[in-house]
Image: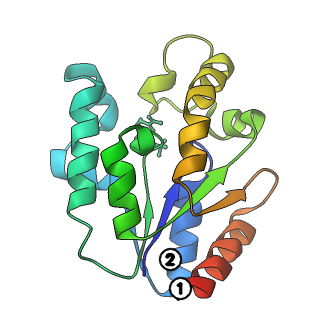
Amino acid sequence: MNIILIGFMGVGKSEVGKRAASRLGYNFLDTDELIEKIEGRKISEMFEKEGEKYFRDLETESLKTLVDFDDFVLATGGGIILREENVKLLHEIGKVILLTAATDTILSRIGSMKNRPLLEDGEKAQKIKEILQKRDPIYNSSADHKIDTTKKDVDSVAEEIIKYAKGQS
Ligand code: S3P
């Protein structure tokens, strides 16, 4: 069985995913990391030089490579659900958990980081709200289970994931 974490930038998919994977004795994978490893460069450079579509194609390719593997927790890039094909692949791969957080929490977690190309133009809080508004319905309809991470630490979110995973196997 595999667990897939979806949700907006800054909700803690990678950190929480690593913690849950190590407690479950699962491997941890991250689509952003897989893509950066294969390409040998940063996502921000791909967005800058080739544009978003190039990166989105790589996201789809990275998911296709995972369908035959088992026992991992996968953290995904915040925009992975933008393609219907990806959402189908996610459900083929495993159980999909949506992590959410209040906009203020997201902002405080990613506020000063320079590695989110989609948040580089304009005021960050406004940008986050705009993107979230568009994506929220897709996040919600793509999820088998939802966890609000606002005001929760990494351990307690990881615990909730583990509880859900154990209930599924
Ligand atoms: C993106 C989120 C990023 C990364 C890319 C695009 C998005 O991943 O995939 O910058 O469209 O929301 P994180 O959610 O891990 O920050």
Q: Secondary structure at mark 1?
A: helix
Task: Give the total number of marks visible in the rendering.
Answer: 2
Q: Image check: 66 left or right of 145?
A: left
Q: Which residue is mark 1?
A: 24
User: How would you rate the neighbour count of disc 2 (Cα within 10 Å): few for under 14, some for 14-19, many for 20 or more?
Assistant: many
Can you tell me whether the CB of the residue at mark 2 lies under 8 Å from the nearest atom of ligand 1?
Answer: no
The image position of residue 47, as x and y in percent, is: 29, 26
The image's colouring method is rainbow
Going by the numbered disc 2, the residue's amino acid type is Ala
Q: Image check: 71 left or right of 122?
A: left
Q: Secondary structure at mark 2?
A: helix
Determine contact: label 2, label 1, CB under 8 Å.
Answer: yes
State whether residue 96 is above or below residue 52.
Answer: below
| Residue at point 63%, 72% (across, down) | 161
The image position of residue 83, as x and y in percent, is: 35, 40
State whether residue 7 is above or below residue 44.
Answer: below
| Residue at point 61%, 47% (across, down) | 140
State whether residue 13 is above or below residue 49.
Answer: below
Quadrant hosting residue 27:
bottom left
**Image quadrant of ligand 1?**
top left
| Residue at point 56%, 26% (across, down) | 131
Q: Image check: 131 left or right of 34?
A: right
- Determine the residue located farthest toward the right in the rendered image: 151
Instruction: Say which mark, if any, is on residue 21.
Output: 2
